[in-house]
Amino acid sequence: MYTLSATPRTTKRAKDELSKLRIPAVLYGQGGPATGLSLPKSEFVRVFAAAGSSSLVDVVIEGASTVKAIIKATQVNPRSMDVIHVDLHQVRMDQMMTVEVALKFVGESAAVKVHGGTLVKSLDEVTVRCLPADLPHAIEIDLSKLASFEDSITVGSLTLPKGVEIDEDASITIAKVSAPLTEEQLKLLEQSSI
C-alpha cells in the first residue's frame, strides 16, 4: 500500500504552492465536493513512480481523515517536465471501478530469439473493471507464448487476477511477431529508397 500525506490547500495560486516545493492537487469523487489539497513534491514523485495510475493510495489529509484514492491525472510543465498539478479520485471499496492498467511484458519469444522476427506490441495498457481491493498494479504478458510467426497474444487470452474483468474487445491483438524481411524484400526496399 502507498501513502501520501496532504494538507488542505490555503493558497489560490499554483505558483505559490510550487515555490514551496509542494504540488497543488484536487481530490474528488463519491458525490462530495472537490477538495483542494497541497502535496509534498518529493513524496508525491516517489509515490507516483511506484504506484502509477493503477494502484490504491492512502491519502492522509492533515486535520481530517485518510481516504483511498487513485492518481487519476497529472499535469506537467512542458519545459521542465515537473508535475504541476494532480487529480486524485477517491474510491469506495465496495464499488466497481474502471481503470487503465499497464501491461508488463515478461519472458522471451522464440520467434524473435531463434527465428529473427520483430516483436510488435499494439497495446501498453488495458481497461479493467474491478473492486478497488482487486486492482492489479500491472498485468503480466508472457512473451514465451510467441513461438512462431502465426502465434499472437490477444486481450481474450489474458490470465486475469481474481475479481478483475477486461473492458476491451477480446479479439484485439496485444502482441505478435513479424517475420524478418526476405532478401528480395530487402532489395526492393533499398531500390525504393534511392
Image (tube, rainbow, N blue to C red):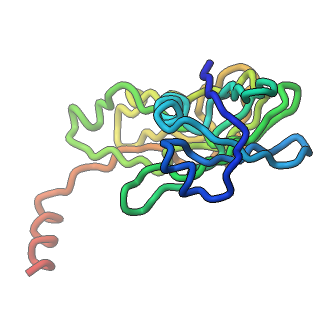
Q: Residue furthest right?
A: 31
Question: Front-most of 27 and 144?
Answer: 27
In this orientation, which residue lies closer to the viewer: 8 or 87?
A: 8
Dividing the picture into quadrants, the one containing residue 189 is bottom left
Say whether residue 165 is left or right of residue 174.
Answer: right
The image quarter in which residue 90 lies: top right
Rendered location of residue 47, percent (x, y)? 52, 29
Q: Which residue is at a point 47% across and 30% down the rendered structure image?
A: 46
Residue 163 percent location from the top left of the image:
76, 23
Nearer to me, 31 or 135: 31
Residue at point 13%, 78% (across, down): 193
Q: Judge from the rendering whether residue 59 lies leftward or rightward of residue 159; answer left or right.
A: right
Q: How far from the left and from the top, in percent, is residue 87? A: 67, 47
Quadrant into which the N terminus falls: top right
Residue 114 lies, in percent from the top left, at: 21, 32
Name the one closer to the observer, 58 or 135: 58
- Residue at (60% x, 26% y) in the render: 159
Image-quadrant location for residue 127: top right
